[in-house]
Amino acid sequence: MRHVATLTLIVVAIIHLLPLAGVLGGGRLSALYGLPFDEPNLAILMRHRAVLFGLLGLFLLVAAFSPALRMMAFVAGFGSVLSFLGLAWSVGGYNAQVGRVVTADLVALACLVVGLGAHLLSDR
C-alpha cells in the first residue's frame, strides 16, 4: 500500500510541476492556457503562480518518499485540486487549454483519493 501512496503522490506532483514552465514568460503561459499574457501585471501574477505550483509540486514529490509528510501533502493536494475544480465548475465557459487543466486536476483528484486511502490503510 505504501507504494500506491508513493506512486499517486508522484503523479500529483508531476501534474503540479507542469505549470512551472510558465515562469519562463508570457509565451509559455499562452501555450499553457490559450490566453494572451501581454499585460505585465497579469504576466507577473501568473508567473508567480507558476512558481507556487512548482513549490507545491516539489513538496508533493518529497512527501511521496517521506511518509511523515504525506498527510500534509494530501491536504495540500486536495486543497489545490478541489479549489481549482470548484472555481472552474462555478465559472464555466473555459477554453480547451483550461479544459486540459480541469482534466489533469480530475486525474490528480482520483490519485489523491486512491493515495490517501492507501496511506491510511498502510498505517494500520
Image: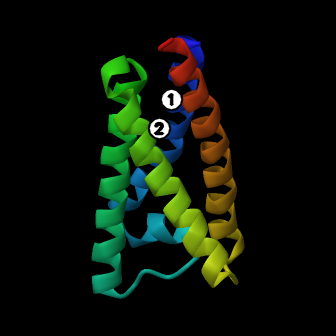
Please state, as top left, top right, bottom left or bottom right, where the N terminus lies in the image. top right
Q: Tag 1, which secondary structure? A: helix
Tell me what residue is drawn at x 39 percent, y 37 percent: 73
* Marks 1 and 2, how far apart at CA: 5 Å
> Where residue 102 sits in the image (x, y, percent)?
65, 61
> Where residue 46 sits in the image (x, y, percent)?
36, 71
Q: Which residue is mark 1?
A: 10
The residue at the far front in this view is 124
Q: Residues within 10 Å of mark 1 (few under 14, many from 20)?
A: many
Tell me what residue is drawn at x 39 percent, y 32 percent: 71
Would you say residue 82 is visible in this rendering? yes
Q: Residues within 10 Å of mark 2 (few under 14, many from 20)?
A: many
Q: Nearer the viewer, residue 89 or 56?
A: 89
**Discs 1, 2 touching: Cβ within 8 Å:** yes
Q: Nearer the viewer, residue 69 or 29?
A: 69
User: Residue 22, relative to residue 70: is it above or below?
Assistant: below
Q: Which residue is mark 2?
A: 13
> Where residue 21 sits in the image (x, y, percent)?
42, 53
Q: Is residue 121 left or right of residue 73?
A: right
Which of the 4 image quarters holds residue 37? bottom left
Q: Tag 2, which secondary structure? A: helix
Tell me what residue is drawn at x 56 percent, y 33 percent: 11
Q: Is residue 27 left or right of residue 111?
A: left
